[in-house]
Each structure stands twice: as C-alpha cells, then as structure tokens.
Image (cartoon, helix red, strand yellow):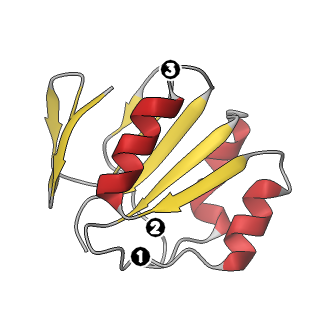
Amino acid sequence: MIDSYQFGHIVIDGKRHTSDVIIYPDKIDPHWWRKEGHLLLPQDLKEVVKRNPEVLVIGTGDPGLMKVPSTTQQWVQSRGVEIRVKPTQSACQVYNQLCKTKKTIAALHLTC
C-alpha cells in the first residue's frame, strides 16, 4: 500500500522512495526511468505488461506533466490491461483502492 505521496517522494509499506517507482504485486522497482523522460512510450512499460496486470495505474507527476500518448494507452489496452492515467496524488489513491481487489501495477512519476 502507498502510505503517502508528496512532490518528490513516496512512502510505500513504510519505506520512503525519492525516485520514480513501479509498484508490482510482489516487489518495487525504485529506479524506473523513461527513455524520453516526460514522455511515456510502450517500450517503457514492456516489463509491466509481461506481468499481466488487470489494471495499470500511471501517475503523471504532481501537476501531471508527464505525457502518456494515446498510442501508448492503446498499446497497453491491446494487451488486455485496463489503464488509468492520473496526476500522481490521484493515482496513489486509485492504486490503493484497486490493489485490494485486482492485480494492479502502478508506474508513478514523483515530480513534475
């Protein structure tokens, strides 16, 4: 579960992280980075879709500046994964709700 989020840091199960993260059901990748920084491309999510989540929650940053093009969203959906794209604060709330009942992965940008 996500305990808290503020610009630049997140606390997950009591552990603080200060770089972008992917939360898998069984582990956390604390060093997630996209090839093009503030543009999320399908290649940035290959490991995520290999895990066959029911839902992928994407946090686009505190003010939501990370872009998730429709082509990326369509690519994820074409693999049978529901996608939710929100500014990171809202994404954290959505993740905490969904992870209780569905196999959910969150990819969260922590800053802009």
In the displayed structure, 30 sits above or below 101; it is below
Three-letter residue code for mark 1: Met
Image coordinates for residue 52, horizontal then vertical, percent: 73, 34
Q: Tell me the residue that label 3 is attached to.
A: 100
Q: Looking at the picture, tell me which residue is in the foreground, 70 or 49.
A: 70
| Foreground: disc 1 or disc 3 | 3
Q: Position of residue 5 (x, y in %)?
A: 19, 47
Give the mark nearest the N terminus, 1 or 2: 2
Name the residue tied to disc 1.
Answer: 66
> Who's the residue at 67% across and 34% down the image?
53
Per the image, label 3 sits on a secondary structure element best described as loop
- Label 1 packing within 10 angstroms: few (<14), some (14-19), many (20+): many
Identify the residue shown where x is 51% and y is 23%: 25
Q: Earlier in the sequence, mark 3 or mark 2?
A: 2
Q: Where is residue 72 in the image (x, y as percent from the top left)?
A: 69, 70
**Contact between labelled residues 2 and 1, with CB atoms less than 8 Å apart:** yes
Percent of width and height locating residue 33:
39, 61
**Which dot, 3 or 2, sits closer to the camera?**
3
Q: How far apart are marks 1 and 3 (CA)?
A: 26 Å
Q: Foreground mark, 1 or 2?
A: 1
As helix, strand or loop, the secondary structure at mark 1 comes to: loop
Q: What residue type is labelled 2?
A: Arg
Quadrant into which the C terminus falls:
bottom left
- The residue wearing badge 2 is 34
| Mark 3 surroundings: few (<14), some (14-19) or many (≥20) residues within 10 A | few
Q: Residue 60 lies in what quarter of the image?
A: bottom left
Q: Is residue 81 left or right of residue 9?
A: right
- Reading the chain from its start, which is encountered first: label 1 or label 3? 1
Report whether 99 appears left or right of 61: right
- Does 16 sit above or below residue 91? above
Q: For the N terminus, give its image quadrant.
A: top left
Q: Is residue 10 visible?
A: no
